[in-house]
Image (spheres, rainbow, N blue to C red):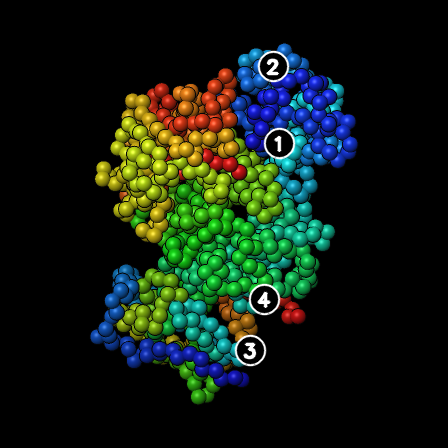
Amino acid sequence: MRTTHTITFLLLGAALVGAGSLALRAGGRPDPTPAQRSAESVRKLICARPFTLDVAATHWWRSEQPRYDAGWLLVLEVDPAFVVAKQTEEPVLYAGAETLERVNHGSESGRVVCILPSPRGANGLPSIDPATLTFFFGAEALPERIDALEAQHQLARAARSGTRPFPAAEVAAARACGGDALGVRSRDELDPIAALLVLEHAPEDADVGTGMLAPRVPVK
Amino acid sequence: MKIAPVCAAVLVASAAPQALAQALPAGPHAPAGRAIAGLVHEDVAGRALARFPHFDFVQSFYAGLAIEAAVDTDRHPSLVGQTADVWLCAHRDAVGWGASPVLVDVRGAFQTVTFASGGVQANLLTLDNGLGALSGDVGAGLGRALDVVIDMDRDGRLSTGDWVDGADSTPGLWLLAPTTQQGPLVPVEVLYSGGTWLGQDLYYPSNVASLGELPLVVVSHGNGHNYQWYDHIGYFLASYGYVVMSHQNNTVPGTETASTTTLTNTDYLLSNLATIAGGVLDGHVDRHRIMWIGHSRGGEGVARAYDRIFDGQYAPVNYVLSDIKLISSIAPTDFQGNANTNPHGVPYHLWTGGADSDVNGCASCNICQTFHLHERATGARSSISLHGVGHGAFHAGTGGLFATGPCLLTRADTHAIMKAHLLPLAEWHLKGNPAGREVLWRQWESFQSPGVPTISCVTVDLMHRGTTAQRGVIDDFETNSAIDQSSSGGAVIWDVQNPAAGRLDDVDSDFTTAVNEPMNGMTFSGSVADATSGMVFEWTGVDRSIVFELVPGLTDASAWRWLSFRACQVTRSTLTTSQSGDLDFSVRLRDVNGVTSTIAIGAYGGGIEEPYQRTGCGTGAGWANEWETIRIPLADFTRGASALDLTQLSSVDLLFGPSAGDAQGRIGLDELEFARD
């Protein structure tokens, strides 16, 4: 298993919780609406499974488009109002100071399957611990425009609104739900597993799941 | 309908056909492979109008609807009293007719007519009553090409002195199959994936192996949509001989990411034809004829993808910029603005739903004003606006219609209209087939495919503009911001009320009428980088006019085919709300001798449509200003006994008020020009 740390994630999330004095850059995105500030916008961590990739993938959900070769496959329960699909800007889902890749929308079930990229730790597994992160919806934006500074900015705002990490017992339950660490060759092999989670937890998004499970074209 | 060599036609028609036959070397008995000389090429097929110019010479007809013909004996008085036979024949080009001049009527029998004085009104003929004698089904084609022959010497052959509509590079008319129906080929669908963000839903004709190389249509869905939701496009176009691929589109991060998936999926398909679907498409996809059609964020994404190649930011492996023949955006967003999402010179097409509650078009939301990309396109461009259609009605998936407003259309209704428009659009841009091209500009009220919904809620507005080479711009308001001078440099003399010229951008955040906001309801321009400008004005119960004097380069209009402009009723103006319907006014041409000819725009079956009566975005009813293009054939101004000299025009006059149409109104005006194909 190749260990390629090609990114430097700004995972100061936990440390910055409550860091209300963080300087905000000029032009930072406006405050979320009152509803978005709700600590209840991300209600529960249902499942969490660590994974590693032999071949690093691109995190398209950040302007820097960092590469990652490990992370967490998560199932979150959220307020459905935050994940109604629209063509204009949507609330961005964060874990700490990182944007989450949302695999499905989940506007009916309130269940969102997500991918949280992470560097690898010394043990070869994701170095990020979901138990230390706050999960929240930030201001409406295109995730591809969110850079590290903006992510920190949103985290600080979330912290000021009272958002906190999930209780340890809940995270432990989610870890149990998720199962053992998953080692796959690439995102191509991770996708079917994410698709099955969509079908299980957000059946109204079945088209997303079945679309990801389409038969693979044989490689020449 | 073609630009006929009018002067030559008059000359020939006035001479004795027999004498010409003796004088000209080629003719009915010319050696095979040579064109027949001395034919009179004139437009004949068309449709009767209730008022001047009394007849509309057009080229496309839907099977099942009447086909009429007319001869203007005011312009050709020598025909009066003459008897001839009228034949409707399969189209051949000039050489084909030379090789085989025997007339065979596709209806089974020709008609005999004797021409009378009184112009087109006195010389109308129904070629087909639309009751099924002719079929528009011609295999995988959109239409059936026919020529109309008036056999003056009644010898049953196309020969010198005969009149013919067609018989050259273009036919006299196209008989179109209803474009709402599936085509004759059997489509096959295959779902597969090449990996992450490479899920593809593929459609192709089952007999693709025998069809050569087919054009490729790539569908890029919108945010929250799915690539399996475009069966209505895939199955439909595949049945007419297209390969359609709808792909997973990474829209949630944004339109830049979406553009990446458009680019990579197109490349993936083209580089894996040997293995996809068992290799059935290998050698049967024409990578030089590609159309990208995207929806909402995907609609912006396809234009952004083109712009990335244009700017050298992305280099496709299996295709190049010039292989993209058409970009079509369904309710596109505009996140990236003029600098990044710009179709440049590629042919561009836009679909807009008036009831869209997502990309809603309100003045407060620059991101969701759908016309920005269309206005940036510098090549040929066209648009279709549909009242009552919501954002979700354009796809065939689950979820709501995302629609707000009165008189909402269902997905089924929307898809029928989409098919009727999409096929002619694709045929023209991807196959060079002009059979249904008139769908892009003829008013919906008078030209629509059988099978489209006919409920009163259906209102469709079209805009169309050709390439720069096909336009002689009189005034597009982009330069010479003063109202009294056109962009071409001519004087503009006006007495309309409250005129204003400037960027077509509603500068506040709503559509509420305000005295100090002349451009209320305009959504063509977003940021100041979008410079589309135009004019607004009004009239109230008294005759008014705007006279555009022509500069020397534009006085000879004989080489142009249409006078064209686009106009809209201004939303929520009391002059619009009190009108509550199509708006009519007139266009007058004046030549250097002072001869004039005037045509009311409503003569062709529709005026300027009223805005969709949706509320919100401020107070009042009426959504964004909805423009439509009016094209009037220049030859129509010479109908009857008019002595108007199209080679020496002096002005184009727009006439408003009780004597010219509706008594009052407030409209926007832009792109006044001469045009040809």
User: In the rendering, at what x and y percent does residue B537 appear?
Assistant: 30, 33
Front disc: 3 or 2: 2
* Residue B194: numbered disc: 4
Q: How many marks?
A: 4
* Residue A185: numbered disc: 3
Asked if the residues shown at circle 3 and circle 4 are in contact, with their CB atoms under 8 angstroms apart, the answer is no
Residue in the foreground of this view, choosing between B261 and B191 = B261
Instruction: Answer yes or no: are tags 1 and 3 on the same subunit.
Output: no
Asked if the residues shown at circle 1 and circle 3 are in contact, with their CB atoms under 8 angstroms apart, the answer is no
Label 1 sits on residue: B173
- Give the Cα separation between the discs numbered 2 and 1: 25 Å
- First in sequence, mark 4 or 2: give its number: 2
Name the residue type under label 3.
Arg
Front disc: 2 or 1: 2
Asked if the residues shown at circle 1 and circle 4 are in contact, with their CB atoms under 8 angstroms apart, the answer is no
Residue sitting at 56 percent across and 35 percent down?
B449
Left or right, residue A161 beside residue B376: left
Residue sitting at 57 percent across and 41 percent down?
B424
Label 2 sits on residue: B78
Front disc: 4 or 2: 2
